[in-house]
Amino acid sequence: MRIFPFKRKEIFSETEKERLVQAIRVAERLTSGEIRLFVESHCSYVDPMDRAKEAFVSLDMGKTKLRNGVLVYVAIKDRQFAILGDQGIHEKVGDEFWVKEAGLLIDHFQNNRIIDGIEACIAEIGASLRTFFPHEAGNDANELPDDIVFGK
């Protein structure tokens, strides 16, 4: 008898993954800012912001030159999320911006448009990063990967 290893169901299809990675690349194109997307099925913390903070640190997001990294954390099955901006971007946009982005995700999630919501959130974060941290030719490097990080 052969035993096959259990293969967990993928959270996103390949097409959805490509859409989200492309959204990150487009959002970062004209900014020195960095956006990461961290996705998992369940959040093991009571407050998803605690999980986002842990992921932020583990992904070295606080080490960007201008402290302008933003993490979008989503626990799909729990329908929880957190958006965490580093000190540099937070000082520019303030709490109101993050509340607005949270509302955007909530609206999309309530209508079961998760990919569209994440994509729209990334686009708006990118627009703010471009405003406050425009790309400087010859001086900007992509400091963090543009891929999606999948947790547990």
Image (cartoon, rainbow, N blue to C red):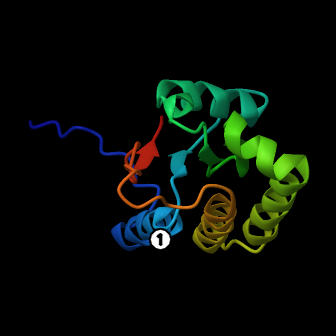
Q: Which image quarter: residue 130?
A: bottom right
Quadrant where the N terminus is found in the figure: top left
Residue 47 horizontal side relative to residue 130, left or right: right
> Would residue 90 be found to the left or right of residue 68 on screen?
right
- Counting from the top left corner in percent of width and height, residue 35 is at 54, 51
- The residue wearing badge 1 is 26
**Which residue extends farthest left?**
1
Viewer-proximal residue, 82 or 42?
82
**Residue found 50% across the figure and 35% down from its top:** 64
Q: What element carries label 1?
A: helix
Tell me where residue 13 appears, x and y as whole percent: 40, 67
Count of marks overlaid on the render: 1
Of all residues shown, which one is farthest toward the right? 96
Q: Which residue is drawn at 87% across and 54% down?
A: 99
Residue at 74% in and 71% down = 108
Nearest the viewer among 112 and 142 is 142
| Left or right: 59, with 113 as reference point | left
Check disc 1: other Cα within 10 Å, few if <14, some if 14-19, many if 20+.
some
Q: In the picture provided, is 32 more to the left or to the right than 101?
A: left
The amino acid type of the residue labelled 1 equals Val
Spot occupied by residue 8 in the image (x, y as percentages of width and height) = 37, 46
Instruction: Tell me which corner region of the image, top left, top right, bottom left or bottom right, holds residue 118.
Output: bottom right
